[in-house]
């Protein structure tokens, strides 16, 4: 069974069709990437999947359950968690506490149970702390646990956002341009981390402009252009697909990050 299934998903903004009758399956195993020129509808697609926007038409199924139009919190509670293009951390909290906040999304020890069942709440707190520290080690942030999140350089903040999203123990993680603003070394480290997340059993669906990361990390790629799915397949298949090459070469104003990717897709 697919982890995620989109059937005829459409989103209109007035007269503009930002996502146009898009259907694809995301298998539970591995990394699936969504690529496409600027304005192709990728972020809108993620907002539809994660419940931040309702679709105008179509159906979205997660683990066999219809989640179309459900609220973001209800979708997150089912195990579908999203990161954003722009980092959204709790800047005044420490690095460790940012990850602990993510863990508490799934913790049983809310405020009342913490008051009523202090022993079990304390046990859970210890488990949360251990899990948070594991995730910091996993993302290379262990030595920075006590720093305020705002003190981290940008690349580290992106890693922290990933650690926090993983803290919730998601079944599927949606990563919106995780390599944006990272240098080549950070991007390579990110690629390894994403691979390990998938190998450990979490489904990864990502939007990315960094074609090196996509080609090295994704098992399969879905390509969108002007809101429509124009191709899907392995990285090698899509980079050789004439429709994909045309979409990238025809992109009106490729961004700085997209420009080399476009050429790489076209010529690589
Ligand atoms: N809230 C909105 N209201 C009106 N139009 C919108 C809204 N959100 C997105 N759009 C439009 O929908 C289209 C798709 O935008 P979207 O941000 O999903 O593309 P994208 O592929 O994520 O682009 P990028 O790669 O630049 O992030 C664009 O034409 C955009 O201007």
Image (cartoon, rainbow, N blue to C red):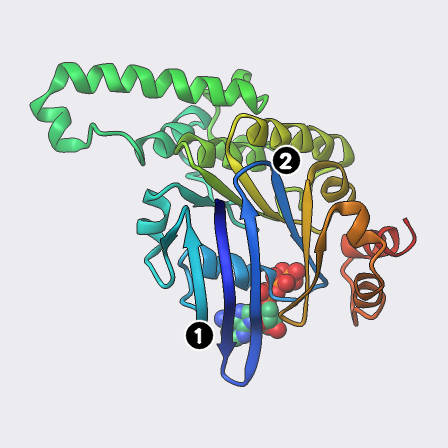
Q: 191 or 223: nearer the eye?
A: 223
Q: Residues within 10 Å of mark 1 (few under 14, many from 20)?
A: some
Query: Residue pushed farthest right?
Result: 267
Q: Is residue 216 rendered to the left or right of residue 167? A: right
Q: Position of residue 227 (x, y in %)?
A: 62, 70
Residue, x 36% and y 63% (percent of image)?
69
Q: Is residue 67 rendered to the left or right of residue 226? A: left
Query: Residue pushed farthest front?
Result: 1
Q: Is residue 251 rendered to the left or right of residue 127? A: right
Q: Quadrant of residue 249?
A: bottom right
Looking at the rendered structure, the secondary structure element under dot 2 is helix
Point out which mark residue 155 bears: 2
Residue on which the image places disc 1:
56
Residue, x 41% and y 46% (percent of image)?
63
Q: Earlier in the sequence, mark 2 or mark 1?
A: 1
Gap in Å between the C-alphas at discs 2 and 1?
36 Å
Q: 125 or 55: nearer the eye?
A: 55
- Label 1 CB, ligand 1: below 8 Å? no
- Label 2 CB, ligand 1: below 8 Å? no
Q: 259 or 40: nearer the eye?
A: 40
Ligand 1 - quadrant of the structure image: bottom right
Q: Nearer the viewer, mark 2 or mark 1?
A: 1
Asked if 117 appears above or below 89 in the picture, the reply is: above
Q: Position of residue 106 (x, y in %)?
A: 30, 33
Residue, x 19% and y 32% (percent of image)?
110
């Amino acid at each position: 069974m697919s982890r995620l299934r989109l059937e005829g998903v459409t989103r209109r903004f007035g007269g503009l069709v930002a996502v146009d009758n898009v259907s694809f399956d995301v298998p539970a195993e591995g990394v699936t990437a969504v690529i496409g020129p600027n304005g192709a509808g990728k972020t809108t697609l993620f907002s539809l999947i994660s419940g931040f926007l309702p679709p105008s038409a179509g159906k979205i199924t997660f683990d066999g359950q219809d989640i179309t139009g459900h609220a973001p919190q209800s979708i997150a509670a089912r195990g579908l968690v999203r990161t954003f293009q722009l980092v959204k951390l709790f800047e005044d909290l420490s690095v460790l506490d940012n990850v602990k906040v993510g863990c508490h999304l799934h913790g049983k020890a809310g405020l009342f149970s913490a008051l009523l069942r202090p022993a079990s709440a304390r046990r859970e707190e210890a488990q949360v702390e251990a899990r948070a520290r594991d995730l910091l080690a996993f993302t290379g942030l262990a030595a920075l646990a006590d720093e305020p999140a705002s003190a981290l350089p940008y690349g580290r903040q992106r890693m922290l956002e990933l650690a926090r999203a993983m803290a919730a123990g998601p079944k599927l993680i949606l990563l919106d341009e995780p390599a944006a603003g990272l240098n080549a070394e950070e991007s390579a480290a990110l690629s390894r981390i994403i691979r390990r997340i998938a190998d450990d059993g979490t489904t990864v669906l990502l939007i990315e402009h960094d074609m090196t990361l996509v080609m090295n990390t994704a098992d399969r790629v879905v390509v969108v252009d002007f809101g429509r799915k124009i191709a899907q397949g392995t990285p090698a298949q899509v980079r050789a697909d004439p429709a994909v090459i045309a979409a990238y070469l025809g992109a009106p104003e490729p961004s700085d990050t997209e420009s080399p990717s476009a050429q790489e897709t076209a010529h690589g």
